[in-house]
């Protein structure tokens, strides 16, 4: 079954740039432009009337910048669209990330780069749906895993992170507990509470209850408990998914 086109709007003060981006979006076959404007002052009303999934938002505009619009979107209630900033300068990348930007496209960008953004959006929705579906089947009880000496009993609430080395997985838990089991990380992931645990890479799962920082420059998640820090690697792609996971989880952050 063919997937429905992603509903988008474009806010761009340059008419020529608006036309080019509209053409580019529609040409992907993955999305449709359901609204656009060169007047940033009407952006919020346009969002309200068109209910887009993604907003392509120029940053440098007169009087009202894209960052100003993103700030207002962040303060509104209800379901919020994903924001993809479009700009000719990378000077605003860090600030854009603070407004939970889904992506940051540097002009001029190719159709392939745009398709990657749209595909990642689809992947994000699929991932969120998977995690939500798992919640109905999960329990918060103690889990039992085999190790070389017999079995260990793991309380997921005490697990800080889990790392993998080949066919072995190691639980790092509080207080100062480490358990290595002879089970693949993917198998363990399916038994963990889906609203708390997040897989940062092929070799690590973290308990987001202990997550305190995301270092995007170093590509690391930083977890802490009782003054002790724990770190694991995470790709830029997974950082975006983790940010979305944290926004949608039932944990206050």
Image (cartoon, rainbow, N blue to C red):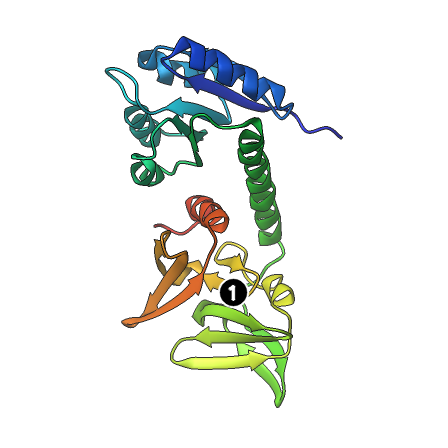
Horizontal and vertical percent position of residue 190: 62, 61
Name, please, the residue furthest toward the right: 1
The answer to which of 214 and 90 lies nearer the viewer is 90
Task: Specify the quadrant that holds the N terminus.
Answer: top right
Q: Quadrant of residue 150?
A: bottom right
Q: Quadrant of residue 75?
A: top left
85, above or below 190, in the image: above
Name, please, the residue furthest toward the bottom: 149
120, above or below 60, in the image: below
Horizontal and vertical percent position of residue 169: 57, 74
| Residue at (65, 75) in percent of width and height | 167
Horizontal and vertical percent position of residue 159: 46, 70
Q: Quadrant of residue 191?
A: bottom right
| Residue at (57, 61) in percent of width and height | 202
| Residue at (52, 70) in percent of width and height | 163
In this orientation, does residue 119 appear? yes
Element type where label 1 sits in the image:
strand
* Mark 1, residue position: 204
31, above or below 216, in the image: above
Horizontal and vertical percent position of residue 221: 40, 59
Name, please, the residue furthest toward the left: 63
In this orientation, does residue 80 appear? no
Image position of 55 (left or right of 72): right
How many circles with numbers are drawn on the protein? 1
| Residue at (34, 34) in percent of width and height | 90
The answer to which of 143 and 33 lies nearer the viewer is 33
The answer to which of 59 and 123 lies nearer the viewer is 59
Query: How would you rate the neighbour count of disc 1 (Cα within 10 Å): few for under 14, some for 14-19, many for 20 or more?
Result: many
């Amino acid at each position: 079954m063919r997937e429905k086109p992603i509903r988008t709007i474009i806010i761009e003060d340059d008419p020529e740039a608006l036309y080019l981006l509209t053409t580019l979006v529609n040409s992907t076959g993955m999305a449709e432009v359901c609204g656009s404007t060169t007047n940033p002052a009407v952006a919020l009303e346009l969002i309200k009337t068109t209910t887009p999934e993604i907003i392509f938002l120029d940053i440098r505009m007169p009087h009202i910048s894209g960052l100003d619009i993103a700030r207002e979107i962040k303060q509104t209630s209800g379901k919020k669209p994903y924001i993809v900033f479009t700009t000719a300068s990378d000077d605003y990348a860090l600030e854009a990330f603070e407004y939970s930007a889904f992506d940051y496209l540097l002009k001029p960008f190719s159709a392939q780069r745009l398709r990657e953004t749209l595909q990642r959006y689809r992947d994000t929705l699929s991932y969120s749906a998977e995690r939500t579906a798992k919640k109905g089947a999960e329990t918060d009880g103690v889990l039992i895993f085999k190790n070389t000496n017999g079995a260990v009993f793991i309380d997921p609430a005490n697990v800080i992170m889990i790392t993998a080395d080949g066919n072995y997985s190691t639980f790092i838990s509080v207080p100062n507990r480490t358990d290595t089991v002879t089970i693949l990380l993917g198998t363990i992931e399916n038994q963990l509470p889906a609203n708390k645990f997040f897989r940062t890479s092929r070799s690590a799962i973290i308990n987001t209850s202990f997550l305190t920082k995301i270092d995007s420059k170093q590509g690391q998640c930083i977890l802490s408990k009782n003054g002790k820090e724990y770190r694991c690697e995470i790709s830029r792609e997974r950082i975006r998914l983790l940010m979305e996971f944290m926004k949608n989880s039932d944990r206050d952050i």
